[in-house]
Amino acid sequence: MKPFNNLNRRDFLKVLAASGLATTLPSGMTIAAEQSDSKARIVIIGCGLAGLASAHRLRRQLPNAEITIIDGKWEHNYQPGYTLIATGVWNDTNKVKTANAKLIPNGVKWIQEAVTEIQPDNKVVLTNANNKVPYDYLIVATGLRLGYDKIEGLDLLAFGQKGLGSVYHSPETAMATWHAMDEFRKKGGRAVMTLAGTDMKCAGAPLKMTFMVADRIRQAGTTSGSQIDFFAAKTAIFSVKPVADKVLELWKTLDVAPNVHYQKELIGVNMDSQTAIFRQPETGEQSTEHYDFIHIVPPMFAPDVILNNNELANEKGWLNVNAETLQHTKYPNIFGLGDINGTPRGKTAATVKKSAPIVVHNLIRTINGQTPDVAFDGYTSCPMLVREGEAMLVEFNGKGELTPTLPLVNPLQPSYFAWYLEDVMLKPAYMTVLRGHA
Ligand SMILES: Cc1cc2nc3c(=O)[nH]c(=O)nc-3n(C[C@H](O)[C@H](O)[C@H](O)COP(=O)(O)OP(=O)(O)OC[C@H]3O[C@@H](n4cnc5c(N)ncnc54)[C@H](O)[C@@H]3O)c2cc1C
């Protein structure tokens, strides 16, 4: 492999410089930092990337406001790093862990509890410790819930054993997934890769896992005794067609493409016999498949606090926000940020990067009695790993149109640069977003 693949060294350095800008500015736009001396009470639910990015910005832009963040989780996880752990690129789970106490901005109150109910008409949230927290304005940033409980027979403690893997759950499960993949690649056999039928966070991750398992067996010399099958619950492997087409083209060269099965939803596993049970969503017909390694992608849902709230949820259970202003469609004093939003696509950190400044801007305008005036275009991106040392930097908007922002980088051309972004540059960029500087 040439060191920079489709980029020569000079181009690579030019792009690197440009991408430095790209990580410190919202892609393609600058928003005036709206200020206010309001003493409003603002509650943020969730201490993930979305909650922290908005807390940092609000603290700076509303110096007199009373800002509270509610989340019972004490540790923040850099989730994009799970893919690198689960494929053996990073070998230390500490790289994706930071204590929330170190990330919450000074002057923001942290209630270490879970919100159990939001009463939007009373402007109050209730917590699992029977606390009642009143607010004037609310940012919902709860992320999503992983529905592993919908897969019958699955024991979450068994990841890493008998070929069982899943990149999504936690740093430890990502490491266990690598152990299972590493064992599998030594002998080869049948890898069963799955894709859920619901909206998902980082919908590219199951594809990255598939590319990387193929690469790991290639490196181990066990490709000839192996087969990789991809079972998608939907009718496509990715919702952005040019990306799906490109991935399928690359999978042809890896012999995955003949074994892509559509409308096969994973509903159960038998961990003793190493078999997976799939259901055809329309006919309900079931089939059983043997695996030596399985990558489980659970269905994903809004957390119950939104899912069960008819005033706040849309028909699919996600927070019902205006896709452009990210303001709740019924309650103007509520905004949504991150994976919880019922917006098309865009459950990624890249989406938070571009939409956090917009939410804060539009919220402060609302506090000042003005209407939101900046629209989000649904931007998201995903460095799609295709083998060790190569990735494609795919960027697109809410309509599923490719929207490349970096010069000289073809979004559908694997390059070392895109790999370098994921491996080295993405985490510092993520932390910049989290601290409200990007
Ligand atoms: C394997 C994997 C790979 C990924 N790769 C990429 C990538 O390459 N590029 C990219 O841009 N994105 C990627 N992502 C997606 C990205 O990590 C998420 O989109 C992003 O972290 C979402 O941030 P969030 O704040 O909305 O949710 P989260 O970071 O999940 O945080 C939600 C927080 O809300 C809290 N919470 C939930 N319910 C309640 C409640 N009732 N009360 C109080 N608190 C609550 C939770 O405890 C949690 O701390 C990846 C994700 C995974 C899992």
Image (spheres, helix red, strand yellow):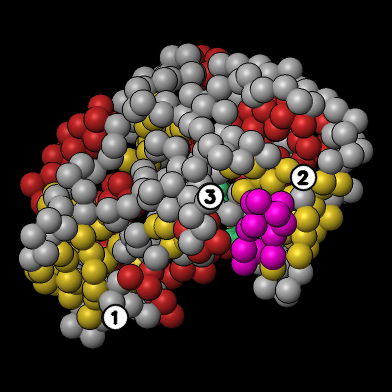
Which residue is at a point 30% across and 72% down the rendered structure image? 151
* Frontmost residue, 300 versus 211: 300
Local secondary structure at mark 1: loop
Q: Give the answer, above or below, for where 341 lies relative to 307.
A: above
User: CA–CA distance between discs 3 and 1?
Assistant: 33 Å
Instruction: Say which label, 3 or 2, has the lower sequence index.
Output: 2
Q: Is residue 135 visible?
A: yes
Instruction: Say which label, 3 or 1, has the lower sequence index.
Output: 1
Residue 395 falls in which quadrant of the image? top left
Q: Give the answer, above or below, for where 106 lies relative to 425.
A: below
- State the residue lying farthest toward the bottom: 272
Chief SS of the magenta region: strand
The answer to whether mark 3 and mark 2 are in CB contact below 8 A is no
Which numbered disc, 1 or 2, marks the residue closer to the eye?
2
Q: Which residue is mark 3?
A: 312
Q: Which mark is residue 136?
A: 2
The answer to whether mark 1 and mark 2 are in CB contact below 8 A is no
- The quadrant of the picture occupied by the C terminus is top right
Q: Which residue is mark 1?
A: 153
Which residues are the magenta region? 115-126
The x and y percentages for residue 152 are 28, 77
User: CA–CA distance between discs 1 and 2?
Assistant: 45 Å
Does 132 appear in magenta? no
Local secondary structure at mark 3: loop
Instruction: Say which label, 1 or 2, has the lower sequence index.
Output: 2
Which residue is at a point 21% across and 60% down the rendered structure image? 265
Rate crowding at label 3 as few (under 14), some (14 to 19) or many (20 or more) other CA atoms within 10 Å: many
User: Left or right: 394 with respect to 249?
Assistant: right
> Please, what is the three-letter code of the amino acid marked with disc 2?
Asp
